[in-house]
Image: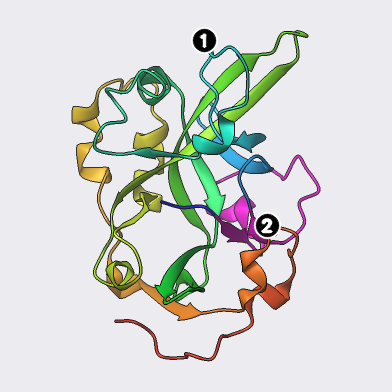
Amino acid sequence: MCGRYTLTSPDDLVHEFGLFELPYDLKPRYNMAPTQEAPVVLGGARRQLKLFRWGLVPAWANDMKGAARMINARAETVHEKSSFRDAFASRRCLVCTDGFYEWKREGKSRLPYLMRRKSKQPIAFAGIWERYVAHDDEVVHTFAALTTDANTMMSSIHHRMPVIVEPADYDRWLDPGITTREGLEDLLRPADDREYEMFQVSEKVNSVANDSALCLRPGPDQQTLF
């Protein structure tokens, strides 16, 4: 799964996603957590950046209590599950990040690692989004990130990782004319190990209350796991 991620250089999103400008005053984030608002890119005549809440709530849900459990959708079954299939067919997005955390269990300890591009450029998770109308008529937009099998590097820590969409595939992922899995099958794959690095970081990231550059401070184990 993917339960935390970073967006340390939000100004880079303009160039990366071909945006006209950033419509929000985005601050660097070092520990993005479920249920928080986070930037996603939508398609259309011109790509748009929006702030949606992380944790998908289906339009038919009775309430938003399950949002924290719906932060990820498995790429293998996203087109079948009732909570995700409509969004997968018609409401796909790019989740804006530049790194993500996973934890390695050693005894009773959970040691956090960060995976990012060696170039430190932005990363786009494959995402899906929903529009939910609450009982008080408040409209809430939510999203989930797709996950797939871990690549070789990540598999030493966890068996899953986010689906990462490469820049050449942004338009296809956002294309509303593609409504079936067949047109996107080849995108739902693990990322190429050769473009990424992974290293242990500070245990400060274990608490969602910590959201500063200190989260990225290298941990005691500095060997990259590939």
Q: Is residue 193 visible?
A: yes
Q: Disc 2 versus disc 1: distance between alpha carbons?
A: 33 Å
Q: Write down the region rendered in magenta.
A: 4-32
Whether residue 13 appears in magenta in the rendering, the answer is: yes
- Residue 68: give x, y in percent of width and height: 57, 37
Return the residue at label 2: 10
Quarter occupied by the C terminus: bottom left
In the rendered structure, the answer to whether residue 15 lies left or right of residue 199 reads right
Return the residue at label 1: 60
Residue at the far right in the pictured view = 25
In the rendered structure, the answer to whether residue 28 lies left or right of residue 197 reads right
| Position above or below: 97 against 40 | below
Residue drawn at x 56%, y 46% as measured from the top left: 18
Which picture quadrant has residue 188? Answer: top left
Mark 1, secondary structure of its residue: loop
Q: Amino acid at mark 2?
A: Pro
Mark 2 or 1, closer to the camera: 1
Residue drawn at x 58%, y 12% as measured from the top left: 62
| Position above or below: 47 against 156 | above
Residue closer to the observer: 63 or 17: 63
Q: Amino acid at mark 1?
A: Trp
